[in-house]
Image (cartoon, rainbow, N blue to C red):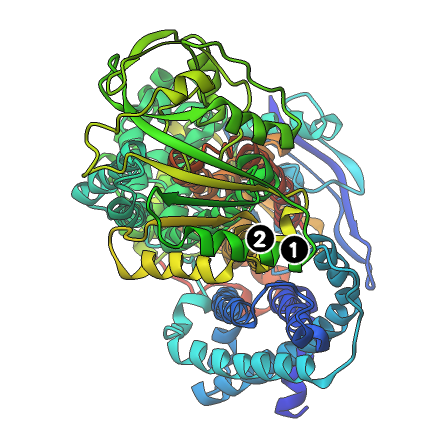
Amino acid sequence: MSILQIQDATKVYEGKVTKRALNQLSFEVEKGEFVAIMGPSGSGKTTLLNMVSMIDTLTSGEIIFNGMKPQKLNSEELAYFRRRQLGFVFQDFNLLPTLTVEENIILPLTIDEQPIAVMEERLKYLSELLDLTPILMKRPNEISGGQAQRTAIARALIHQPMLVLADEPTGNLDSNASREVLELLARMNKENNTTILMVTHDPIAASYCDRVIFIKDGEFFNEIYTDDRRQTFFQRILNVLSLLGGHVGDFSSIRLP
Amino acid sequence: MTFLQFAYRNVFRNFRNYAAFFMASFFSVFVFFIYSMLMFHPEIERGFLGEVSIAGMVFAEVVLVLFSWFFIFYSMRAFLEARSKEFAILLHLGMDRNQLGKLVIIETMTIGIFSCISGIVFGFAFSKFFFMIVREILNLNALPLYLSWEPFVLTLFVYLSAFIVISTLSILFTPDIKIRNFIRGPKFVDAAVSYSKRNAILGIILILCGYGLALITTKASIFSYTLLIPVFVTLGTYYFFSDTTLYIIDRLKGHKQFYWKRARMLAIAEQVQILRFNSRMFFIVTLVSTLAFLTVGVLSAMSSYTSQYDKINPIGLIYKGEMDNPYEIEHILSVIDELEFNGISYHMTRFTVMRQTSSYTSNPVEVFRETDINHLLFSYKYPLVNLKSGEAMFIPYSEDSIEKLERTEVKTVLKENNVDLTINSVYPKMFFPTAIISSNSIIISDEDFEKLTNEFEMAPYVEPGYHLFTFDIPNWTETKNVGIDIQQMVARDYLINSEYTLPFYFENAGLNYSYILATYSLLTLIGILVVAVFLLASGSFVYFKIYANLDREKKQFDMLIKVGLSGKELKRLITRNLMIQFFLPWGLAFVHSAFAFYVVQTVLNDVMNLSIVKEVVFSFTMFALIQIVYFFLIRWRYISHVRG
């Protein structure tokens, strides 16, 4: 069963220079899938993510989320939709510096006014799962980048969303922390059956996924599925990227594990 | 593009960013200029402002200058802070610190000159309006507009030099900008909370001590306490913002049931941040607002005093002398002479007042003769007194006492002469000012008065009685030149000796009134302007702080919207944040001033039985309304900034 269907998504930015950021892009994400979107800079990855999270509206086309159309919601309902159905992981973590790690994690539940008992129960479960227990009382400026992103992942998962959207989650991390975070995302996907849609231009990050969708100039370019070995999957991703013909600078330096 | 062009374009192409700083400077110049226009008014030498002294105005002007300098300096700092990212980029591109300093000075001077010119232009345009208000307040016939170079030069000199000095100072005191913190990566705010529990509790205790002292202040203790109370309250307020608030919030955080509910967490954590970095600002705003409230409260109290003056002091001139006062004839004759010379109509009454001892209380009582009293009452056109032998009547010493004495019935004997009396009524109106007669005064019939032949039992030590001369004068405000010599003798004796030694006492209501009116007018002039600047400034302090943090907050709000905070909830969050920043200092200032007025009221009650509650409540309500309007204005600006 597909949890997210994108049909002929088109986005045109009107302005002094008209720009077509998305052009009749269509794909589906199944429940429990871990999907990466790849593409060169300016290919419309972030625009796509904004469309899915309903921060921006499509010029034409449709997004069907779990059988309903979030475009039809008013702004109040949209806020409720986002806080209950979606989880977010950002490139620069976006943790609130004034709150402790613990408080940052339960933030979505607080906004949703859930009972304290539920908060504590989920917090306990997730902090053990993500190995965050020792740093719960610290503040974001007292923890490492990897820990910060793990906190952000915990925050994205605490309200058990239908879909987690990750925007370059490893963009600000070193290779060790990157690997840690990606393994964590993959594990959450396998064990918790969490659906994850990740935008990245790091082929290593993409190689942890079940499927990689390539877009170029806002259009669908190709998609490939994972196989038994991550190394070969990684090689195949690189092959597609070289076909994609983006500039060299778009690829992050290759770091084989 | 030359450097100068660069600075110029910076200012004029991003005028929106500079607008807040510009407005602060503009308003300071505006107020100062209007005030200078009044100060240099060519008719001031002819005493057109009545009794308002030049010295007082100069003092007010200096206060205004100092405060507006501080205000500009503060807004400058906030403004530079808000732009530190821009400066980091410039430094990153290779600009050196001196050039940066030069840039800031050029920009500040551009804004400074611009705001000076527009402040003066608007000031000149509005000065006729201001003169009209002054004319109304001071009851002048006319206050024409004039044109002269002095106010222009003074304003330009004061403010241009202010801008030079302030921009130099703020560059010298700018903390080093760390490029690394601005160019890339997440910007972390050091959010560790630091407070000491000792100071937190000390803050509360000091404030409560101040309030406690205020509550127990009486007329006698006012001088020792009025020095202590401000010290306690000021220190307490400082600790309150630097430690107590943080302490309280930290305690709140312990209660998850409270803290984790309904997104309170967000608002409260944000408050900690705001309080921690702005405790000094909150402190200043609180003190400044307290001063403003006090000024307005005192002004309204004075206005009520001046309007009630007539009622409290019904007699134009009063001369009170001992039985054997050697100056009596000379003084009374000279007063009468002067009154006639000035063509003032009057009605003189001479009282002989006897002191006797009442058997009922065994306290001295002052006894007045019915005929003397009726003589005075007749000139007031008040109902006359008609007493039989053996009857007596209380003389009220204050408005409140009338009701109290009405219910009192006393049978007593005047010990020295064995005169039996029943005191069973009170005269229903006040006809002597409070301090002139004793609070234990009665009227008796002429027959009984004749019987008072034996002197007061403590006679050699306490005067056995006194002569009282009252001059009821319909045009009592015109008497300020009458009896000046006698008035001066009284005043000198008050100054030189700790106890009053003269055998007579003189009071000139018209003269006192003219003093009070002059002080009142001066205070009004100073007060209105200072309060206007204070109010605007304290509001702007808050606004500048908010403005300086806008970028960081906008980013946070963006994230929260993504996570699913609805528009309504966002507004609620912002309202909550702003509300505390706005109303915490002002609320505290309200409470401070309320206690201050409690002190003023007790003292006034003791001294002259005057109520200022109505005026103070009215002016507080006006203030609250202004603040609420101001709050919504800033909230509106803030929300549009965050969303934009």
Q: Residue at x 40, y 9 (%)?
A: B390
Q: Position of residue A166 (x, y in %)?
A: 50, 43
Q: What amino acid is at disc 2? A: Ile
As measured in the structure, the alpha-carbon distance from the residue carrying label 1 to the one carrying label 2 is 6 Å
Q: Secondary structure at mark 1?
A: helix
Contact (Cβ within 8 Å) of mark 1 with mark 2? yes
Q: Which residue, given by chain and number where applicable, does mark 1 sit on?
A: B340
Q: Residue B241 or A208: which is nearer the viewer?
A: B241
Q: Residue B398 or B153: which is nearer the viewer?
A: B398
Image mark for residue A168: none
| Chain under callout 1 | B
Q: Residue at x 62, y 37 (%)?
A: B625
Q: Which residue, given by chain and number where applicable, does mark 2 sit on?
A: B336
Q: Secondary structure at mark 2?
A: helix
Q: Position of residue B26 (x, y in %)?
A: 65, 68
Q: Residue B289 or A103: which is nearer the viewer?
A: B289
Badge 1: few (under 14), some or many (20 or more) residues near its Cα, within 10 Å?
few
Q: What amino acid is at disc 1? A: Glu
Residue B176 appears left or right of B377 = left
Q: Is residue A113 visible?
A: no
Residue B413 appears left or right of A156 = left
Q: Residue A243 or B74: which is nearer the viewer?
A: B74
**How many tags in the picture?**
2
Q: Residue at x 24, y 22 (%)?
A: B363
Vertical relation: B209 (above or below) B538 = above
Badge 2: few (under 14), some or many (20 or more) residues near its Cα, within 10 Å?
some
| Chain under callout 2 | B
